[in-house]
Image (cartoon, grey):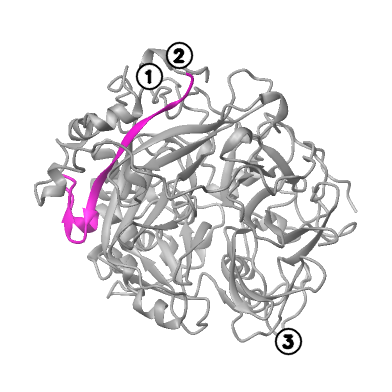
């Protein structure tokens, strides 16, 4: 077997990314987005100085937030309703919190894992681990076991897909759970021996189609451990892939811009693409996010209509051939032949995992962009708010609030009563205001004189049902081309907003801002209080509190919980905690909470030269901000998921061994099967020994 490739440290040759990602990962995961100009060319102004000299509470009390919202968006909002003229009423200050949310560090009593470059999942002393499922494992009886040299499209459609990302567990009872998993993208060089990227075969392309998508697998608790075992052949097991049927629902369903030759009604799309993060609803369904869908569609430069071309550019569609060459085998991936097919991707998708015969729904009322995830929280009056990030440099943070109230429960009756809940509501985009002078935000990450990066903000409405609040755009256009609508109303450009998680007890919302090395570059947006570092390669985590602690509020306050990087760097920040006692963390991506209310952060593209990992951090009390590393993933891998409950910690190990120059014939990892094997993305469970 060829020797393992050497570890490529941050900034090594062959990688266009300032983070620790390899050039191969950049090409296959997001279409080399970091190597291209940002699609957001808007000149949105940041009103950092408006709040100078005011506390966050005072800013809200005086109604200044609302005044600024009017300045920022008033010229662009339509006149279709009162909400357009007044995004929020004047307010008198924050109400009482819902109560103590935990998050004081209880449950984080492990010895932190040291940064490393080992080709393994490394956990603290006293913990055991096992692989629950990996690429190619069968979901159904009679399906062949994985063999890298004997792959077929038919087998892959019934096997666990590639590059698992979001992970969730839904209860079944008697020690069983429904494990729901996204399969974000494929890396054909790591899947096929002798793969020729310029000339893929039809079988290789169809295996890629089948390895994308989603898996639903029943898993059984293993007695005496925290491990989970797949129940192969269970009636609820399911694979959804690029050829599966998905229903378009909500305001855009049937619109002329989602009609195609194959679907002239514009209501049935084939497949889901580049599913990154996700979420679970209180009524027992699964939300999955379509992220870098743009990279699958070829020949954007052939489009001559200037409006269509501008829309394609704003979403980063490929000008010529795509990396995987799918357009050679299916015309729907060729924009010259089917320009509307791309509009059927970029949505939040809702699935009922308890019903294997159900058709997944693409919920168009939640807007179309590069969704990282969708995470719910119930408003004070019983509606549902969905928080969403658009994962691209200089893109935006969004919120959707339903019109209808949530029917309680997570049984079949509740799912039936809530089945159209996400088709009707209001979509907002965030505008952030700092409460320090913009002159104090010098781009280094040094704290302003008040000792915190903080401020207030507003949710600017974009669309509600058939009412557009964006001048020059219909409601359907706002939902189809949400990025352009947010540009018009002056949303705040953020440093890659990825996972957005409301705390299940306090309602505070946490936003992972992964990185943005172009912040402050010539011609780009300068550092601001919500994104305080130029050339931001390590990212930060933002904490947002809705006005009155109500997820339906139109205004909020915010602060930065973490400014990530090497704790020895004085321009990092750890929630006020002593940097000498924290683990270094870089490029926060997915977020989760444990039963004690602590925040857990997984990383993607560690720019500190070590493997990616999973970290726990208390949110309250004397330990607030004490980041502790719980695990690291193998060489070349990204930490995805994660899932934390009373019995186990789970992560998806994505793209192990995905380094520049790696292939099936020249692997850069031997995880999880050991010597002589090819690396396989997989799900790992970790538990305390002797539990």
Q: Dot 2: what SS?
A: loop
Name the foreground residue: 29 vs 527. Answer: 527
Please tell me whether residue 470 belongs to the stretch shown in magenta. Answer: yes
Question: Are the two marked residues, 2 and 1, in contact with CB atoms closer than 8 angstroms?
Answer: yes
Mark 3 or 2, closer to the camera:
2
Tag count in the figure?
A: 3
| Dot 1 or dot 3, earlier in sequence | 3
Contact check, label 3 and label 2, Cβ < 8 Å? no
Name the one closer to the observer, 612 or 622. 622
Using the image, tell me which numbered label, if any, was put on residue 436.
1
- What is the distance, in whole Å, between disc 3 and disc 2 at their CAs? 66 Å
Q: Position of residue 305 (x, y in %)?
A: 24, 49
Q: Where is residue 563 in the image (x, y as percent from the top left)?
A: 56, 29
Q: Give the range drawn in magenta.
A: 451-477
Instruction: Name the residue carrying label 3.
Output: 142
**Residue at 58% in and 19% down:** 571
Residue 449, numbered circle = 2
């Amino acid at each position: 077997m060829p020797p393992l490739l050497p570890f490529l440290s941050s900034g090594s040759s062959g990688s266009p990314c300032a983070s620790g990602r390899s050039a191969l990962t950049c090409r296959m995961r997001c279409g080399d987005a970091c190597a291209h100009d940002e699609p957001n060319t808007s000149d949105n102004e940041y009103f950092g100085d408006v709040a100078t000299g005011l506390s966050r509470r005072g800013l809200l009390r005086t109604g200044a937030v609302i005044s600024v919202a009017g300045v920022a968006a008033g010229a662009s909002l339509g006149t279709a309703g009162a909400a357009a003229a007044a995004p929020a009423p004047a307010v008198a200050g924050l109400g009482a919190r819902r109560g103590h949310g935990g998050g004081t560090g209880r449950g984080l009593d492990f010895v932190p894992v040291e940064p490393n470059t080992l080709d393994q999942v490394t956990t603290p002393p006293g913990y055991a681990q096992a692989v629950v499922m990996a690429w190619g494992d069968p979901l159904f009886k009679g399906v062949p076991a994985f063999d890298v040299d004997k792959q077929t499209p038919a087998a892959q459609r019934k096997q666990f897909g590639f590059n698992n990302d979001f992970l969730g567990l839904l209860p079944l009872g008697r020690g069983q759970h429904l494990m729901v998993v996204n399969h974000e993208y494929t890396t054909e060089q790591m899947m096929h021996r002798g793969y020729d990227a310029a000339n893929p075969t039809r079988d290789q392309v169809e295996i890629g189609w089948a390895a994308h998508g989603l898996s639903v697998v029943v898993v059984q608790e293993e007695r005496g451990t925290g491990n989970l075992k797949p129940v192969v052949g269970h009636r609820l097991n399911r694979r959804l892939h690029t050829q599966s049927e998905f229903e378009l629902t909500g305001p855009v369903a049937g619109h002329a811009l989602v009609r195609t030759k194959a679907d002239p009604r514009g209501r049935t799309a084939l497949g889901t693409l580049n599913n990154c993060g996700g979420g679970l609803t209180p009524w027992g369904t699964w939300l999955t996010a379509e992220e870098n869908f743009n990279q699958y569609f070829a020949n954007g430069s052939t489009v001559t209509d200037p409006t269509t071309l501008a829309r394609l550019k704003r979403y980063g569609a490929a000008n010529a051939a795509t990396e995987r060459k799918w357009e050679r085998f299916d015309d729907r991936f060729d924009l010259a032949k089917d320009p509307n097919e791309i509009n059927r991707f970029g949505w939040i998708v809702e699935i009922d995992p308890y019903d294997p015969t159900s058709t997944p729904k693409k919920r168009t009322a939640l807007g179309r962009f590069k969704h990282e995830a969708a995470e719910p929280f119930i408003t004070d009056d019983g509606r549902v708010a969905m928080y969403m990030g658009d994962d691209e440099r200089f893109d935006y943070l969004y919120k959707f609030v339903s019109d209808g109230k949530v029917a309680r429960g997570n049984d079949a009756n509740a799912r039936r009563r809530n089945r159209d809940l996400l088709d009707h509501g209001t979509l907002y985009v965030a505008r952030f205001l700092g409460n320090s002078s913009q002159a104090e935000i010098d781009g280094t990450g040094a704290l302003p004189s008040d000792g915190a990066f903080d401020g207030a903000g507003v949710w600017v409405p974009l669309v509600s049902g058939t009412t557009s609040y964006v001048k020059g755009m219909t409601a359907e256009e706002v939902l189809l081309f949400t990025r352009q609508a947010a540009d018009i109303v002056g949303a705040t450009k953020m440093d890659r907003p990825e996972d957005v998680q409301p705390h299940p007890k306090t309602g505070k919302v946490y936003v992972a801002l992964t990185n943005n090395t172009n912040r402050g570059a010539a011609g780009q947006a300068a550092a601001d209080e919500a994104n305080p570092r130029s050339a931001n390669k390590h990212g930060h985590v933002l904490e947002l509190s809705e006005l009155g602690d109500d997820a339906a509020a139109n205004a909020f306050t915010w602060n930065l919980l973490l400014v990530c990087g090497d704790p020895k760097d004085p321009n990092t920040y750890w929630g006020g905690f002593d940097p000498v006692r924290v683990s270094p963390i870089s490029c926060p991506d997915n977020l989760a909470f444990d039963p004690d209310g602590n925040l857990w952060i997984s990383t993607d593209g560690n720019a500190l030269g070590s493997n990616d990992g999973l970290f726990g951090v208390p949110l309250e009390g004397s330990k607030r901000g004490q980041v502790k590393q719980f695990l690291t993933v193998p060489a070349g891998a990204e930490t995805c998921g994660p899932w934390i409950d009373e019995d186990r910690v789970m992560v998806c190990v994505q793209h192990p061994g995905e380094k520049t120059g790696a292939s099936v014939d020249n692997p850069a990892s031997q995880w999880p099967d050991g010597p002589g094997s090819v690396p396989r993305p997989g799900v790992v469970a970790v538990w305390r020994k002797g539990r």
